[in-house]
Image: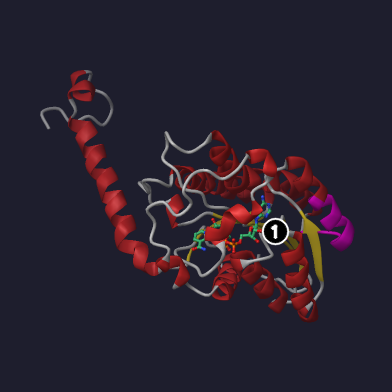
């Protein structure tokens, strides 16, 4: 997508942080924006602030509820006619050990961070394919979607890996259908993410696991301005980037992860099980 003026963006988690930053950046490009969020009063206040910058609509939507997402899509198409840029950005964080997090914690984090992205795609991608103007989908993951091993953060860490995998598939599917797809992988951004339980729907039960388990929150508090992330997202969409990163300092850590994979691939080529049957790629006598 290389032209934005007059086109329409639908952004989830739009009342705060990165979602709000994306809305501001989209408006600055002359887009019309539908802001979707679960937190109605904060959403209304944010939209009222932005209304001087362009055409802004709001819809209260819990992205973990597929019917609510579908209704939000219908309301957006009714209000603006078409949607071109879909930002599945809403997300929540919750700590907890793999064997310790309550079932409700898993359901909530996977429901918002992963299923919410799927529901957004299901509600909007057929529409984008149909209108034929092309479009772009940005799914918000995290550096936690590429770097594993965040002990005590299993639900969040694994939900974000799932978003990366889904977006890589979506991008391939979009090549045949005329839309692009990017995965936003932020490092620390100064937002309200660690106050996520404020928006935990009752059906997931009360928060039990320790939200701040073992994580240095100062990285988030000192993090990047979410408005800068919003501008970066528009730049990434314009240049059709697959990964939109906000913190280039993670390069060394990502390289180390891939070096570890290569080392273990080489080990498998020399393993007794694979060499004993002459499996493809196995190195005899290696
Ligand atoms: N802040 C960071 O450092 C950071 C780093 C990596 C990834 N992220 C990701 O960025 C995204 C945005 O988070 P943020 O940091 O701006 O936090 P934030 O809390 O400031 O904003 C998140 C927004 O999502 C909304 N939301 C929560 N549950 C929802 C639901 N069920 N349905 C609809 N809206 C819901 C909240 O009301 C809020 O407005 C998330 O996916 C998060 O995981 C953030």
Numbered range of the magenta stretch: 72-85
Query: Is 120 placed above or below 246 here?
Result: above
What x and y, as percent, mark residue 152? 39, 46
Residue at (30%, 50%) from the top-left corner? 258
Left or right: 24 as drawn, with respect to 109 = right
Q: Can you tell me which quadrant of the image ligand 1 is in?
A: bottom right
Query: Is 220 placed above or below 121 here?
Result: below
Q: In the rendered view of the protein, which quadrant contains the C terminus?
A: top left
Q: In the rendered view of the protein, which quadrant contains the N terminus?
A: bottom right
Left or right: 33 as drawn, with respect to 206 = right
Left or right: 93 as drawn, with respect to 84 = left
Taking the view exactly as shown, the residue that stands out farthest to the right is: 78
Q: Quadrant of residue 23?
A: bottom right
Query: Is 203 placed above or below 284 here?
Result: below
Taking the image as drawn, is residue 63 in sight? yes
Magenta highlight on residue 56: no
- As rendered, which of 167 and 149 lies closer to the eye? 149
Task: Give the residue at mark 1.
Answer: 135
Pointer 1 residue Cβ closer than 8 Å to ligand 1:
no
- As rendered, which of 269 and 244 lies closer to the eye? 244
Q: Main secondary structure of the magenta part?
A: helix
Left or right: 167 as drawn, with respect to 47 = left
Circle 1: element type: strand
What x and y, as percent, mark residue 101? 48, 38
Residue at (29%, 62%) from the top-left corner? 252
């Amino acid at each position: 997508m290389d032209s934005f003026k007059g086109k329409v963006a639908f952004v989830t988690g739009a009342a705060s942080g990165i979602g709000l930053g994306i809305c501001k950046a989209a408006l600055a490009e002359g887009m019309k924006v539908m802001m979707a969020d679960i937190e109605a009063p904060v959403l209304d206040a944010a939209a009222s602030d932005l209304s001087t910058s362009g055409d802004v609509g709001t819809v209260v939507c819990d992205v973990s509820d597929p019917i609510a997402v579908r209704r939000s899509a219908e309301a957006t198409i009714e209000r603006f006619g078409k949607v071109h840029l879909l930002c599945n950005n809403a997300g929540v964080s919750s700590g907890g050990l793999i064997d310790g997090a309550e079932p409700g914690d898993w359901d909530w984090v996977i429901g918002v961070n992963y299923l919410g992205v799927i529901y957004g795609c299901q509600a909007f991608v057929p529409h984008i394919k149909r209108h034929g103007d092309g479009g772009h989908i940005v799914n918000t993951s995290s550096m936690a979607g590429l770097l594993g091993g965040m002990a005590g953060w299993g639900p969040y860490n694994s939900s974000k890996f799932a978003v990366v995998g889904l977006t890589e598939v979506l991008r391939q599917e979009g090549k045949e259908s005329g839309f692009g797809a990017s995965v936003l992988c932020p490092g620390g951004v100064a937002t309200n993410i660690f106050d996520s339980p404020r928006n935990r729907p009752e059906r997931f039960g009360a928060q039990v696991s320790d939200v701040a388990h073992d994580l240095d929150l100062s990285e988030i508090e000192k993090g990047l301005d979410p408005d800068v992330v919003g501008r970066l997202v528009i730049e990434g969409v314009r240049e059709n980037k697959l990964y939109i990163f906000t913190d280039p300092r993670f390069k060394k850590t990502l390289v180390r992860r891939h070096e570890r994979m290569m080392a273990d691939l080489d080990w498998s080529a020399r393993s007794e099980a694979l060499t004993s049957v002459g499996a493809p790629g196995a190195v005899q006598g290696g």
